[in-house]
Amino acid sequence: MTMVSEVRYARSGDVNIAYRIAGDGPFDVVFIPGTTSHVELSWDVPFLRALFERIGSFARVIHFDKRGTGMSDAAPADSPLEVRMDDVRAVMDAAGSQRAAVYGVSEGAAMSILFAATYPERAWALVLQGGEARALWAHDYPWGEHEAEVRAAIDAAAPNLNDPERLAGRAREASPNATEEEVTAIVNYFRHGASPGARIALVRMNMSIDVRHVLPAIQIPTLVLHHAEDPWVPVEAGRFLARQIPGATYVELPGRMHIPAMADAGRYLDELQRFLENAWSAAGDQEREPDRVLATVMFTDIVGSSERAATIGDRGWRELLEQHHELVRRQLMRYRGVEVDTAGDGFFASFDGPARAIRCACAISESVGGLGLDVRAGLHTGECELVDGKVAGIAVHTGARVASEAHPGEVLVSSTVKDLVAGSGIQFEDRGVAELKGIPGEWRLFAVERSQDD
């Protein structure tokens, strides 16, 4: 019988994250649930119980409730992905897990993808079940939903979002082979997993997420599981994930379902166990230093520095630069930025989250304004090489070129950065398409609306 812990709590910033552990195997699996969850009631859902018991028979599975859902503290449920990644790290630390296979289901897939690319030293395998890189339609993503239709569906469902009959209908749609007892358990799980307001906030945030640019940065063994007639997430979304993630294993399971019933669990669990055990055998506990990482790079420089230096003289300029550098470093510390290089009046820094990078750039602009200085900043998120612990490569060059396009006092970002900060509250103005010197292709750039600064 699988050993199961009581509900425990990990501290992530000011929020307590509820988690449980099942099993005591040689390696860890962190289960990242879909939109909502409940760490106690999940064990009443037959398929989830079977899933945790199966993984717990050969590994240690850690599952948790995202902030604002289930038994975790009330908090904005639509917190950006990087904040929710902090929650994953907090749970892993509390559970004593240095490295784990990350297993993301449905809405949890995007966060799992971003986590695996950003913290490759903490993830040795990735599993994505019924997931998608993007929810909305785009000309190069034709199976996505149209935004107007999604918003209309949210508005229509809002008055009775947690109504038991409505949820029962959704459960039967997602799990048509489920028994009535299974349907009742799923309904209970969903009803107690999130309040109607939290659920709506999550859906609105999730429809804006786009992690397509992150997929090529995944460096670890990956399994993509998708049902051929998934009624909630089109099978094309799963196939797209598998095509874009280097070396991914794709298993397309038969049937029209999003949540397997116990009657459907056998092959699903077999595929999962086979992949995890094989991936662990290949990786073992050989810890290797990652040579690439997903990071957000920020470049800043002072506008009109030569003219200002000529006006106040060499000594005055040195003193002003020292004050500028002190203020910049203070903000880097506040927002967990890493100073990579400083040349003259410019800073180059890296971050593990794009929203933090944006807020840091805005804070720098505001703080140095008190010195009578005006700075411009450019940001880009991409796969970076690690050279002597510092980021390098084409993503870094792209960030520098974005900065060169910024106007005085402006924080300019690439579309990749914009796509990853859904739920952060940061707003943008479209600056159109630009050609970045030495960087292939055309790049759509966005300026941060300064009313969002903090």
Image: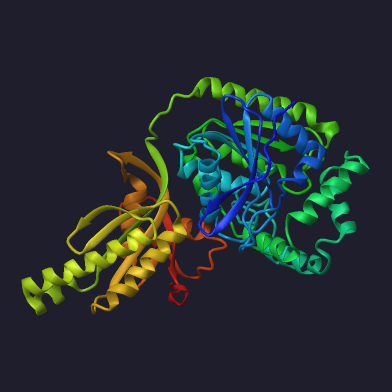
Task: In the rendered view, tell whether residue 88 sits above or below residue 266.
Answer: below
Q: Position of residue 109 (x, y in %)?
A: 62, 45
Q: Nearer the viewer, residue 171 or 20?
A: 20
Q: Residue at x 82, y 32 (%)?
A: 264
Number of disc labels: 0
Against 369, residue 33 (above or below) is above
Instruction: State which quadrant residue 32 falls in.
Output: top right
- Residue lying furthest right: 180
Using the image as rendered, state which of residue 105 and residue 150 is in the foreground: 105
Q: Nearer the viewer, residue 188 or 378?
A: 188
Say which residue appears at 56% left-offset and 27% top-offset: 27
Residue 398 can be seen, yes or no: yes
In the picture, measured across the screen, residue 101 lies left or right of residue 438, that is: right
Where is the C terminus found, in terms of image quarters? bottom left
For residue 322, side relative to residue 13 (left or right): left
Where in the figure is residue 398, as x and y percent of width and height? 35, 53
Q: Is residue 220 above or below residue 163?
A: above
Residue 392 picture location, percent across and down: 31, 45
Name the residue located 77 percent from the left edge and 64 percent from the top edge: 153
Tell me which residue sits at (88%, 38%) in the image.
Answer: 177
Q: Quadrant of the N terminus?
A: top right
- Colour setup of the view: rainbow
Q: Quadrant of residue 198?
A: bottom right
Give the percent coordinates (x, y) of residue 431.
44, 69
